[in-house]
C-alpha cells in the first residue's frame, strides 16, 4: 500500500520541561546532520555546492527544504533514500541537496509556499526551475495532496524536461518569480539582528534557525508595519486548486480526479480524467506547479490550459472571477497565527456544524464562529483581556454578519482596520448576547 507523505511543522514532544525539549531538539538536528554527511548521498544545507556539482556532472538538481526535527520527515527521507524502489533510482539521477533552514536562502530563486514543512524544487544548474513539489491544505492530513507516487512522477517529469533542455527554456521562464524586496530571510526587518545567514553549529542550532513559515510572516509584517493593506497574494498564497473546483489526483502530476459543480473549473470545461499538460504555457510536474500558476494569477484573470483527454489535446480557458482567491481557506496555515494576533486577539475560531447551528437557531447564512481557544500570553492574549471566553459564539464582527469562516474574518479584519483600532464584536454566551471590543494589533 502506498505510503503517504505525512509531514508537519509542529513537532509534538512529551517533554519534562522546556530545557529538556530544547536539548532533545538540538540533539536531533546535530544527529541528522552527522548521519546525512556520513552517508554522503545528500549534500547537506549547501545549495551552492549542489549547483556546482550539477553543472560539473550535467545533472538536474533536486533541492528539498524540510523541517528539522520532525520524526515523520526523517522517516520520509529514510523511505526515499534507502527503501522505496520507485524513488531511489530517480533520485540517483539528480544532484540532491537537503536544506534544513532558510538562513541565507536566495529568495529570488527559492519562491514556494512557505507554509510547507516539505517543499522541493527541481532545477537546472543554470537556475532554471523545472518544477516544484510539496502541497498541504490541512494542518495534519496530507493524503489528498501528496504521495510517494506523485513525487516519483514529478522526478520523472523533471528528468524529461532536463533531457530536452534548453528546448523548453522559454516555457520555463515564468516558473521563476519576481525579484523579492529582500534578498534573503534574515534581511527582513522583523528577522534582522535576530538571525544570521547560516545555522550556528558552534552554539545552539535550534534558536538560530529561520523556519519557512517565518518568511511569510516577515513579508506580511513589512506591510503591517507600514500600515499598508496586505496584498491578496500574501493573505491567500498558493491557492489550492480545490478552491476553484479542481480536485487533482495526488498520485499523478496534474490529473483531474473530480470537478466540483458550478465552479470556475467546471465552467472552463475540465472533466474527470483530464491530464493538465500545461497552464499559461508552463509544463506541470505536480499540484504545486498548478498552485504556482494560480499564485501568480491576477485577482481577475483568464488562464490558458492545455489538456490531454482520450488521446486528444484540448485548449481550455479557466476564467478566474474577481475575488476568487478568497474561496481558499487559510486557517490551517502556520502563518494564520500571526493573522490571529493582528486581527483576532489571539483567538482560534471554528465554524458551528449544521446540527449546532440548528440547536442555536442560527441559519447557514448567519455568522456563527465559536471561540475554540483564547491565547494566554502577550499580544495573543488580547482577546482574553477584552473579555472573550472559550465557547463564545461570534455572531457579528464590526457590524458584519456574513463572515462565515475564520478565514473570512481574518482576511476582512486585517485590512479593514489599522493597528490600534477597536472593533465591536457581538457574541452569544449561552442565552446572552454580549458586546465586546476587540483591539487590532501590529
Image (cartoon, rainbow, N blue to C red):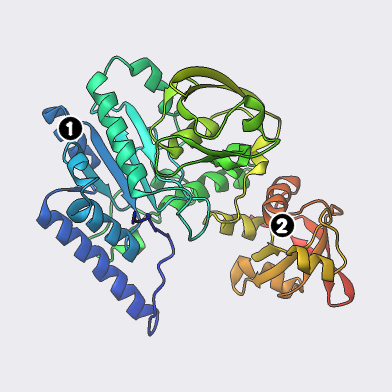
Q: Where is residue 31 in the image (x, y as percent from the top left)?
A: 20, 65
Q: Toward the viewer: 233 or 154? A: 154
Look at the image and tell me in which quarter the N terminus lies.
bottom left
Mark 1 lies on a secondary structure that is helix
Look at the image and tell me in which quarter the C terminus lies.
bottom right
Disc 1/disc 2 C-alpha distance (Å) = 49 Å
Q: How crowded is mark 1: few (under 14 residues within 10 Å), some or many (20 or more)?
A: many
Q: Horizontally, is 245 left or right of 333 in the view? A: right
Q: Where is residue 79 in the image (x, y as percent from the top left)?
A: 24, 56
Q: Horizontally, is 197 left or right of 353 in the view? A: left
Marker disc for residue 298: none
Q: Can residue 190 be seen in this view?
A: yes
Mark 1 or mark 2: name the one nearer the start of the chain.
Answer: 1
Q: Toward the viewer: 2 or 242? A: 2
Mark 2 lies on a secondary structure that is loop
Q: Position of residue 67 (x, y in %)?
A: 35, 57
Q: In which quarter of the image is residue 335?
A: bottom right
Q: Name the residue under label 2.
A: 440
Q: Which residue is drawn at 47% across and 18% down?
A: 313
Which mark lies nearer to you, 1 or 2?
1
Q: Residues within 10 Å of mark 2 (few under 14, many from 20)?
A: many
Q: Quadrant of residue 157?
A: top left
In the image, farthest residue toward the bottom: 16
Depicted 379 relative to depicted 228: above or below: below
Q: Position of residue 213 (x, y in %)?
A: 46, 52
Q: Quadrant of residue 254?
A: top left
Marker disc for residue 54: 1
Q: Residue at x 12, y 29 (%)?
A: 56
Q: Can residue 228 be seen in this view?
A: no
Q: Horizontally, is 137 left or right of 243 in the view? A: left
Amino acid at each position: 500500500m502506498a505510503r503517504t507523505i505525512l509531514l508537519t511543522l509542529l513537532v509534538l514532544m512529551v517533554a519534562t520541561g522546556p530545557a529538556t525539549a530544547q536539548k532533545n531538539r538540538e540533539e536531533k538536528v546535530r544527529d541528522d546532520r552527522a548521519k546525512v554527511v556520513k552517508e554522503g548521498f545528500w549534500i547537506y544545507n549547501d545549495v551552492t555546492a549542489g549547483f556546482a556539482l550539477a553543472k560539473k556532472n550535467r545533472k538536474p538538481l533536486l533541492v528539498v527544504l524540510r523541517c528539522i526535527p520532525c520524526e515523520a520527515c526523517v522517516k520520509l527521507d529514510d523511505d526515499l533514500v534507502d527503501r522505496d524502489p520507485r524513488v531511489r533510482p530517480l533520485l540517483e539521477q539528480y544532484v540532491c541537496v537537503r536544506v534544513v533552514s532558510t538562513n541565507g536562502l536566495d529568495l529570488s530563486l527559492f519562491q514556494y509556499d512557505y507554509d510547507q514543512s516539505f517543499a522541493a524544487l527541481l532545477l537546472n544548474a543554470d537556475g532554471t526551475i523545472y518544477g516544484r513539489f510539496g502541497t498541504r491544505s490541512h494542518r495534519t492530513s496530507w493524503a489528498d495532496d501528496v504521495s510517494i507516487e506523485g513525487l516519483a512522477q514529478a522526478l520523472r517529469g523533471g528528468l524529461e524536461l532536463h533531457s530536452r533542455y534548453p528546448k523548453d527554456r522559454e516555457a520555463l521562464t515564468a516558473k521563476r518569480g519576481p525579484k523579492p524586496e529582500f534578498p534573503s530571510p534574515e534581511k527582513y526587518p522583523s528577522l534582522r539582528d535576530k538571525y544570521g545567514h547560516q545555522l550556528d553549529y558552534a552554539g545552539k542550532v535550534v534558536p538560530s534557525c529561520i523556519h519557512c513559515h517565518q518568511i511569510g510572516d516577515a513579508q506580511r509584517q513589512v506591510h503591517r508595519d507600514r500600515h499598508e493593506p496586505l496584498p491578496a497574494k500574501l493573505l491567500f498564497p498558493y491557492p489550492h486548486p480545490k478552491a476553484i473546483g479542481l480536485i487533482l489526483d495526488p498520485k499523478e502530476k496534474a490529473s483531474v480526479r473530480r470537478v466540483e459543480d458550478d465552479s470556475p473549473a467546471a465552467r472552463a470545461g475540465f472533466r474527470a480524467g483530464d491530464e493538465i499538460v500545461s497552464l499559461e504555457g508552463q509544463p506541470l510536474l505536480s499540484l504545486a506547479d498548478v498552485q504556482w500558476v494560480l499564485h501568480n494569477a491576477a485577482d481577475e484573470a483568464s488562464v490558458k490550459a492545455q489538456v490531454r483527454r482520450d488521446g486528444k489535446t484540448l485548449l481550455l480557458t479557466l476564467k478566474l472571477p474577481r475575488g476568487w482567491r478568497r474561496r481558499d481557506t487559510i486557517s490551517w496555515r502556520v502563518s494564520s497565527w500571526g493573522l490571529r494576533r493582528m486581527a483576532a486577539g489571539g483567538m482560534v475560531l471554528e465554524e458551528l456544524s449544521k446540527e449546532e447551528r440548528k440547536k442555536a437557531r442560527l441559519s447557514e447564512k448567519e455568522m456563527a464562529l465559536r471561540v475554540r481557544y483564547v491565547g494566554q500570553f502577550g499580544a495573543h492574549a488580547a482577546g482574553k483581556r477584552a473579555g472573550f471566553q472559550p465557547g463564545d459564539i461570534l455572531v457579528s464582527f464590526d457590524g458584519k454578519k456574513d463572515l462565515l469562516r475564520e478565514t473570512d474574518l481574518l482576511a476582512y479584519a486585517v485590512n479593514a482596520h489599522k493597528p490600534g483600532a477597536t472593533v465591536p464584536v457581538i457574541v452569544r454566551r449561552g442565552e446572552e448576547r454580549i458586546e465586546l471590543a476587540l483591539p487590532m494589533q501590529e
